[in-house]
Amino acid sequence: MGFTLAILGGFGAVIILMAAYGYRISAKTAEDYMLGGRTIGVVVMFFFVLFAISSAWTFYGFPGLLYTKGPGYVMFIWGSVAGFAGLYMFLGPRLWALAKINRFLSPVEVLGERYQSKALRLILSASILAFIVPYIGIQPLGVGAGFEALTGLPAIYGAIYTAVILIILVLLGGMRIVAWVNIFLGVVYMSALLGSLVWVVSVLFPNGGLVQAARIIAETRPAMLSDPGPGGTYTPIVLGGTFVVGILAFSWPHVAIGCMTARDKSLFKWFPLLIFVFGGLFFYILPFLWGSLVAPAAMPLAELEALAASNGVPLQVEADRVVQTVIKRTLPEWFGVFVLLGVIAAAVSTAAVQLMTSSVIVSRDVIQGIFKPGASDRQITSWARWSVVIIVVLSLGVSALNTGAMALYLTDVSVPGFAQWAPALVDGLLWKRGTKQGAIAGTIAGVVYLVLSLLIVVDGNRILVVGHPVIPSLLLNTIVYIVVSKLSPKPSEEIESQFFHEVDAYLKAESSGR
Amino acid sequence: MIEMTRHTAGRIYLIALLLSIVGFIAFLVIGGTGVPASGVPILLFGWMTMPLVLGVVFVAFWLVSYIVYFFFFWPYK
């Protein structure tokens, strides 16, 4: 126990020291704090984004759902790989150029100016914050679950430890240091994920490795090796819907803001290569193997059910920590601690970027954009910093009330919520005819429908959900956006020039200058 | 993305990616990742389940398409 706590203390100290160093060298401007001075290169960006999207969910929630429902949930990953790459291939260059030319600091600010609407800016800010804040809280709570599984101490201690690290890191460091710390955290995370997988497989399945694990599952739970999985959850319709939900990853606000921190345009040429090769063909396969093959072969379902019963928690909650449980039973204690560090790294790397994004929106879009337009650079940086503390406390409170499974919270609530600004974002950047009336009407329609569809339950069924919560709400949002835009006066020529012609000219000039 | 729609290579690239998404979903709908008629799940190399195989093929297709377009045809390269 003492060894575990000492290691955790040292790990936290390293992160805090890095944040303090970042504070010392930072330029103390809003641009530097919020967007890392727009100096992030391709390698740092890759770690920054990959580990911003790879949270405690990747270590716990994702394998946990694979363990109970079968391999079909991996369709979310394949869709996400396409979505993230699509963001950087299709929208990224324009978003980056627009922000750089006009000194925009937030993606919501880009849209507020594109549509010339403070009301839309407020609506988008409120909508994004409403769905991102609970997700931030899931990260410390996810760590708490692993902490409890490893040490036996109450989960709240692990959650508080993670929350304190998060607050100090974001408060002091800002976006640049969050990006740099993500490299350190990413290396720890990846080593833990890959190292634990290789070691557990070599210990438990010495005669064939993954092939032996697959043979064991074929004998004990053969439905785990194909769709629709045990229980028949992943029907073709659900599989297709899960894949589409994954594609919507391009609209995650904490990923979209990454485009605005890029040093130059060449990043958008190289970044997808890393996403495909390292993310799609390597990194995300690791938790898939953990949840779909290794954990089910290492720990029979009946055993996990008994464990869940003895711990007094639902099966899915116990499944969320099955990886940690298998590691604890199989490997030396010191490695279990290292894996917990990996999970903390995953949680902090994601929540820190989400926190940064939230604080930028609160400070730049809500406070300065709506209430204090004349605020100075120093003031908005200060507001951004202090909003971090409020957001963390709020997110922990909201998440503590939500006792559902981690994986489903991401795909059923957060992703549909993030997606509601997608029509305004995509059409605002790519469609000259999109109007503020269309963006406001579409966003409100989509968010209201989504909230109602999640809240209205009749006989145990969400009657307004068709296939998946995101499908009807996003469809309604998009249709309303297009129809209302067509019916309202088209944007002025100044807006068209600023948001389309100038951007095209800038990107072309950047190209010819090379 | 606007720049891609303005030349032939870009249009082909976008259509190829769109078709790969349609094909992916179609493969799911016809039950390509389910249990075959034999009743024994397909395991490539003895451990790769079909949901994994399908995803790897999909990502590999996007990777090759992206390399060809972005390194040879992208107007802003």
Image (cartoon, coloured by chain):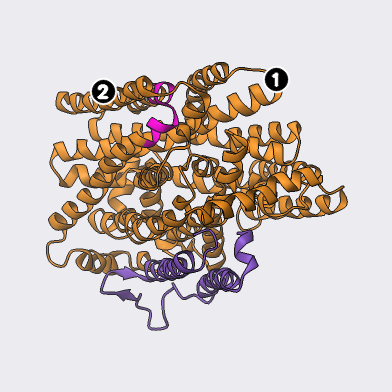
* Residue pictured at 32% horizontal, 36% vertical: A345
The magenta segment:
A168-179
Q: Nearer the viewer, residue A226 or B60?
A: B60
B69 horizontally vs A460: left or right: left
Q: Which chain is purple?
A: B
Mark 2 — residue? A13
Closest to the camera, between mark 2 and mark 1, is 1
Instruction: Reply yes or no: does residue A175 show up in magenta.
Output: yes
The image shows residue A105, relative to residue A66, as above or below, that is above
Could you tell me the amino acid type at mark 2? Ala
Q: Quadrant of residue A114?
A: top right
Q: Amino acid at mark 1?
A: Phe
Q: How many marks?
A: 2
Chain of the residue under label 2 = A
**Which residue was labeled with disc 1?**
A371
Q: Position of residue A489 (x, y in %)?
A: 87, 47
Instruction: Look at the picture and state if A256 lies above or below A280.
Output: above
Chain under numbered label 1: A
Q: Secondary structure at mark 1?
A: helix
CB atoms of marks 2 and 1 within 8 Å: no
Q: Tell me if residue A315 can be seen.
A: no
